[in-house]
Amino acid sequence: MRQRRTETGQKVVTARGTEAREQYERMRHIAFTSLPKGDFSPQTTIKVIMEFVASDELVTLACSVIGDASVYMSSGAFVIGGYSQPGVAKLARDFVKLGDLIIRDGERTEATHYPSQGRTQLFSISPRGLYRVERYSGSSHSEIERAGHSIIVELGKYPARSASGDDANA
């Protein structure tokens, strides 16, 4: 793993080659399998995951109903634990509320394959199961895609975190 500091002093954690891909795979797996604890009604969307390809890099955004937000990139870079920032937590909770659109428009699935180039993939996780919708990425993003991109921008303002959740700037 490599670490570097941005002009604003944030530490960015990256890895190369196989190590980066393995790191991304672990974090992506956690995104789909780690759910917040609670007694949720069957109608509650617990987590929303948005994935797309940007400059030949896979990007995964995972947000939960409790306001947690994390972004993982196939380069090995990641930011986790956005719930500690009130602005990010609010955006994440609002994003998850839009998960009902995925359930309404998507299909129930067990598969979590990667999105194709030029497409955005959205998953909604609820007590009823995993739902997926995939659409073409383009200049006219849907409301949920715009909300997801806003979270990624907001997460970029805060220090990167390590996989253990510790502040990478420490």
Image (spheres, rainbow, N blue to C red):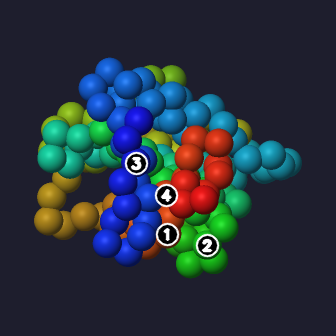
Mark 1–mark 3 Cα distance, whole angstroms, equals: 15 Å
* Mark 4 surroundings: few (<14), some (14-19) or many (≥20) residues within 10 A: many
- Examine the image and state in which quarter residue 58 appears: top left
Name the amino acid type tagged 1: Tyr
Picture layout, residue 102 above or below residue 158 = above
Disc 2: which residue? 85
Secondary structure of the residue carrying numbered label 3: strand
Quadrant location of the C terminus in the rendered image: bottom right
Mark 1 lies on residue: 158
The residue sitting at 69% across, 41% down in the picture is 35
Q: Looking at numbered disc 3 in the image, what kind of residue is underneath it? A: Gln
Name the secondary structure under disc 2: loop
Q: Earlier in the sequence, mark 1 or mark 2?
A: 2
Which residue is tagged 3? 3
Give the spatial CA distance, label 2 vs label 3.
Answer: 22 Å
Q: How many residues crowd mark 1 within 10 Å: few (<14), some (14–19), many (20+)?
A: some
* Kind of residue at badge 2: Gln
Q: Which mark is residue 42?
A: none
Question: What amino acid is labelled 4 in the image?
Answer: Ala
- Distance Cα–Cα, label 3 vs label 4: 10 Å
Looking at this view, is 143 or 22 the one in front? 22
Q: Position of residue 2 (x, y in %)?
A: 37, 41
The answer to whether the residue labelled 1 contacts the one labelled 3, judged by CB atoms less than 8 Å apart, is: no
